Amino acid sequence: MKISLEGKKALVGGSSGGIGKAIALQLASSGASVTLMARNEDKLRAVLASLSTSEGQSHQYLVVDFSDYEGYKKSISKYFESNSVDILVNNTQGPSAGNALEKNVEDYQDAFNLLFKTVVFTTELALSHMMNNRWGRVINVASISVKEPLSYLALSNSIRASLVTWAKSLATDVGDKQITVNSILTGYFDTERIAQLNAKKAEQLGISEDEVLADMKSKVPLKRIGDPKEYGYLAAFLASDNAAFITGTQIPIDGGLLKSL
């Protein structure tokens, strides 16, 4: 099966590294013109230089700070004044770790702005072109914690669950325009985010980061954590015509980690 995204334009959030970068690389490799979006301009430039480019493709980047909602609104609104996208990958950095007793209502508001409001606002801007064109893909990067909450990620558990249920509702509302909306439930992947979480957990437990990683791998049926490029393959498939009848789903990519159905 060949995945071709030739002639499609994609906007990929959080694409200066990790999962977002892997998705951007695969979309570009499949023929899409990609706009990278993140807060670190130096990293964005480096990723931009690594994107596959062939005839008809044109890549660019947009510097934004997802944690500054008002500033983000201005930046993304300006982008859509002169750009449209066929494929939208909603992905931001994660909120701070911590259990429910460590977080207050202001923390939840900040996480809501970061994980939910930025996504809804961006999607609203992107949908206009998709609806007129009667073709579109909205892919949300979420987490397995929406099904089985992780005690040390109270903010992410709560707000990402809201995001996934919103996406399910949106899929119904735009389905007749041939726009698909899907959420990917992320397991353990070899990213900077996982390394940071493992470092904090190691400090709390008084053990080494290698021990934390080994314990993490032991809980995954495949006995390893994911390679970000494997995530990119799934995202590219969902963005393609091959996945035209898949919408409103929450697809785990976790090596079998989830125990629930």
Image (cartoon, rainbow, N blue to C red):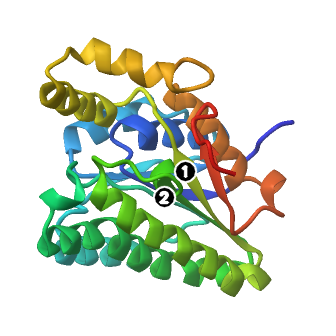
Q: Is residue 222 left or right of residue 114?
A: right
Foreground: 126 or 160?
160
Structural distance between the alpha carbons of marks 2 and 1:
8 Å
Question: Residue under circle 1?
Answer: 185
Foreground: 15 or 51?
15
Local SS, label 1: strand
CB under 8 Å between discs 2 and 1: yes
Answer yes or no: is residue 58 visible: no
Q: Residue at x 55, y 50 (%)?
A: 185
* Type of amino acid under label 2: Val
Which mark sits nearer the N-terminus, 2 or 1?
2
Q: Residue at x 55, y 29 (%)?
A: 229
State the quadrant of the N terminus.
Answer: top right
Foreground: 38 or 189?
189
The quarter of the picture where residue 68 lies is bottom left
- Residue 7 appears at what percent x and percent y? 68, 55
- Sort mark 2 into few (<14), some (14-19) or many (20+) by Cα contacts within 10 Å: many
Q: Residue at x 34, y 57 (%)?
A: 156
Local SS, label 2: helix
**187 up-or-down from 34: above or below:** above
